[in-house]
Image (cartoon, rainbow, N blue to C red):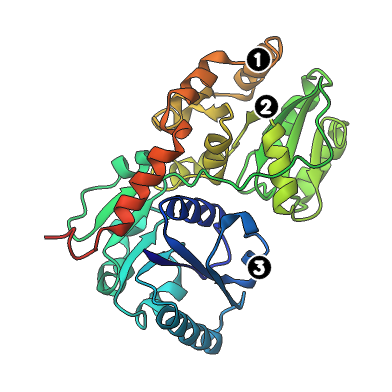
Amino acid sequence: MNVLIIELGGSHAECIYSTVHFLTHNHSEVHVACNESLVRLLPESLQLSGILDLPDHLNFFRQIQSFIKIRKYIADHQIDTIIINTTEIKVVRNLSLVLPRKNTIGLVHNARKLKNSSTFSKVLYRKIKKYLVLSDYLLTEIDPLPKYHVSSFYPIYFPKVEVLAPMKPANEYWITIPGTVAVERRDYLSLVNYISKHKFPENIKFIFLGKFKEREDLVTALADSGLWHSQIKTFDYQLEYNEFHSYIQQSDLMLPLINSEANGFYGNTRISGTFNLGLGYKKPFLLNRKYASNKDLSCFSHYYDSMEELAEIILHLYYQNFKDPVIQDAYQESIFNDMERMSIRFYDFVKTDQDAVLV
């Protein structure tokens, strides 16, 4: 196959990594057309056959210019398969009107859109009839959709990096919360308030692994805790790929910490990027029990209902040196330890002609 991955929303580089890896592993040529800001996140190790740079901010006129470039690139490079990396954005609706008819697959980050969006059923359907959601669990949560052929994959391949400084001291334990530090999305306040009143051993560190969006209540809580910069680490800049993944590699536990009011949104129709990061690096999770129905994660997770229970779990693991052989054995026996099987499954779905799968 000769494949073009298109990303016009400036995000979800993690899906590009896995898509490229799975396809090149199966001897496909892979090209990427994406926003300029994503190009710097595509390392040479991905073995791309070509990259088409597109503007970050696509107003109406830039959309037209970009669509012309994409059509020309498809023709010039004899592309036979197109993968839309983020399907549920308005610019893709517009792009679909001018895309040539090819074997086209759309990655859907919010599975609810497949059922409830008129854009999918009335506009995108003309060009896209094959979709991928980002976990087997999401596949079980959506109703049968006879108009589409839907499968799933896990974007858990990440280009390897050499661990950058700071190297984690041998006696430290890192509990990492990946993603932009935004109070409206994750319950940082409850965590900070709790650990400031109930002291943890000093060698347990909480890493808020994303750019810190200053909000007065969180800044005040961090300052009052007396733990900022000693046991709670934050960043005032956007981390580059190598630094971000160096921290992930060295982390002992992943703590998504998604706000309870967001649990429904991320529980049944959408997957937090933290989940695939943890699965990719085979890290144990600390999860709110509301996620217990997600069987993709159950073998690799410790569940809590409250900050008190979360603290008990952390201290229990601390006295075991954060070693959990049960979870490590579960990873070894799971599909997440079989990249070959995952790549074949992905490749087989992509290569099937979309008109042949619907009868």
Residue 196 location in percent, x, y?
A: 80, 27
The quarter holding residue 231 reads top right
Compared across the picture, whether 24 is left or right of 315 comes to: left
Outermost left residue: 359
80 and 335: which one is in front? 80
Residue 129 image position (x, y, % from top left): 26, 64
Q: Amino acid at mark 2?
A: Asp
Residue identifier under label 3: 37
- Residue matched to label 1: 317
Residue at screen point 48% across, 26% down = 289
Q: Nearer the viewer, residue 263 or 91?
A: 91
Check contact, mark 1 vs mark 2: CB within 8 A: yes
Give the residue type that dot 3 points to. Ser
Q: Which residue is mark 2?
A: 252
Q: Residue at x 62, y 60 (%)?
A: 42
At mark 1, the secondary structure is helix
Distance from disc 3 to disc 1, alpha carbons, whole Å, reads 39 Å
Q: Amino acid at mark 1?
A: Leu
Q: Residues within 10 Å of mark 1 (few under 14, many from 20)?
A: some
Where residue 283 sits: x, y (%)?
A: 59, 29
From what the image shows, is residue 196 above or below residue 315? Answer: below
Residue drawn at point x = 84 percent, y = 40 percent: 165
Q: Is residue 210 visible?
A: no
Task: Tell me if label 2 and label 3 are in contact, CB under 8 Å.
Answer: no
Q: Give whichever of discs 3 and 1 has the lower sequence position.
A: 3
Crowd band around label 2 with a 10 angstrom C-alpha radius: few (<14), some (14–19), many (20+): some
